[in-house]
Amino acid sequence: MNTHLALEFAQPHLLDTLLALDAAQLDTLEFGVIGMGIGADAMVRDYNAFESKEAGLSKERVIGHPLFTVVAPCMNNFMVAQRFEDAAAAGQSLDLTVDYVLTLRMRPVKVQLRLLADPGAERRFLAIRRL
Amino acid sequence: MSVEAPDDLAQEHEALLQFVYMAPAGLVQARSDGEVVMMNPVAAQLLMPLSYDGDLSNLFTALADIAPDLHSRLAAFAAPQGMVCDGLHLPVPGVDKGERRLFAFTLIKLDDTRVMAMLQDVTWQAKRERLLRQQEAWLSAILTGVADYALINLDTRGCVTEWNESIGRVTGHGPDVVGRSMAVFYPEDAITPARVQDRLHEADDTGWSLDDGWRQRAEGTRFWGSAMIAPQRALVGDNPLAAATGAVAEPDYCLIVRDMSAHRDAAESARHAAVCDHLTGIGNRRAFFDAAETELRRWHRMPRPLSLLLIDVDHFKKVNDTHGHPVGDAVLRHITRVMGETFRQLDVLARIGGEEFTVLLPAADLASAQCGAERLRAALEAQPAPTDAGPVFCTVSIGIATMDEGTTGVDALLKRADEALYAAKHGGRNRVCGPPMVLAESA
């Protein structure tokens, strides 16, 4: 049971681990996780409890909506959205950690984003932890 | 029932939160020292590239590079609340891919402790607007009847970047004109290097800069023409990159010099009626205030010498009383003719009262303004006005004011010139007086 809680933001092979978890298991994590489809609209598939609490948005409001245009337009730029698109266009896998500032509940918060994608996987992930 | 109410409230709260998350403009609430209380994602997205370490805890610090004076603007805003600035355009140096941006910034003082700010990236709007303006200017350049026109590309400094046939045809200049300032197309006393910069700045600000007047061909003859400058760059503002490297950049401005000889009379008479004094043909009050306000705007952007002469005809009432008004009118015309011979084309001459004239002297400091004023005074003392009643001698008193930091506007400048004129009158007339400090020095 505790194996999930022990999952680390920075651990290796995070993408494979996240792909294997169901929604309830994602909710036990101590960092934010947003899962999205591989389509160009980046439809949100997973939105874990940690992220929901930090952002103040319930899962119902977010899941099933395009991430970069409707849910988090602040990440629709060359640092985040563009990198997912570039990786998809090049058919390459992506595992990149970037420093970023999110405005969680209207307060600027320094975070690290880990961008995870693989051409063979049917979901992509964005992991978020506060600095 | 009682359970549902807080639930609704939570739902509403969440919807509101999402509404602000998705707002397409940057919104910030801060304390009066700039410390951020709340900020939405677009604000963070716009501010982050400006911040050295991604620290967005203070709005004024985050904007320090592009708007260093926000703190003082807010401090200088005396009202208890209100708009400190509204849609202020802030050019943002390029980051990453080097593309320059333009932000529109609005700051509202809520009370003594809180401000609200709105930030928008208006780069594309500005670009579109500029293109529209440019098209409009181009259309007017092409559609307005002209004898001929030259199309000249200029760099950031206003220097010709390449030669073409239209330049040869209209101005007579050969390929050796490349690299020379656009001032080469003007008579020598009609433009200064600072004025070239002013025109470029004005083109940046408004999309184009247009002026009618004498132009000069390579061999020295003059023609009546108009010069329109339109910025060619995609974005507003300077181009520090090109300036720093000294590289010969792509053309930054397009200058169209039109030969208006054929249309001069019609265009001039229309302009004349609006801004010229009917008796003497020099500028009227309106022309003076228009020109003075333009010069003061230029001064505030880039302070450089700027002086004003206020001229009053000595004992003019006696001339009228003795010889009648037609002779008085001839005296006034004589004075403006001598003024025209004394000052440069760049200087703005105007009649702002019955026997009161002004000369606005761009690029003239106190010493050269004094020189010009003295030349005029001496010339009028020496040359009588030819009138139907024979030659009539008439002298003038002149007050000088020079623009400085403490002068708030045209009225203030005029008032200081008036004080100097008063001193000249009371010093015995037929003399030139400057600011009080100079009087003390020469005493």
Image (tube, rainbow, N blue to C red):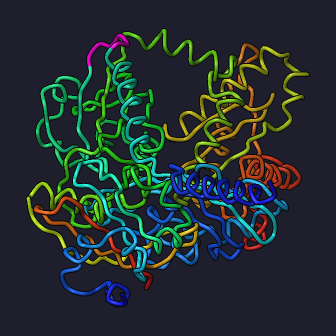
Q: Nearer the viewer, residue B296 or B322?
A: B296
| Relative vertical location of residue B96 with respect to residue B282 in this rendering, above or below | below
Rendered position, B288 above or below A7: above
Residue B164 included in the magenta stretch of the image:
no
Q: How many marks?
A: 0
Quadrant, the N terminus of chain A:
bottom left
Say if residue B363 shows up in the picture: no
Q: Is residue A101 visible?
A: yes
Task: Name the side, left or right, on which B309 lies relative to A34.
Answer: right
Q: Is residue A11 left or right of residue A60?
A: left
Relative to residue B426, is residue B59 drawn left or right? left
For image coordinates 71% across by 66% down, the residue present is B74
Q: Position of residue B182 (x, y in %)?
A: 30, 42
When the figure is inspected, residue B47 is found, relative to residue B336, above or below; the finding is below
Write down the region rendered in magenta: B143-148
Assign the magenta stretch its main secondary structure.
loop
Residue furthest out toward the left:
A91
Q: Residue A36 location, x and y as percent?
A: 30, 59
* Residue B40 pos. (x, y %): 55, 62
Quarter in which the C terminus of chain A is drawn: bottom left
Q: Compare residues B250 and B314 and report the one nearer the observer.
A: B250
- For the point 64% across and 49% down, which residue is it? B373
Q: Give how far across and how far down residue B27 sits, in percent.
A: 59, 58
Of B364 and B116, the residue lying toward us: B116
Residue at 37% in and 13% down: B144
* Observer-nearest of A109 and B72: A109
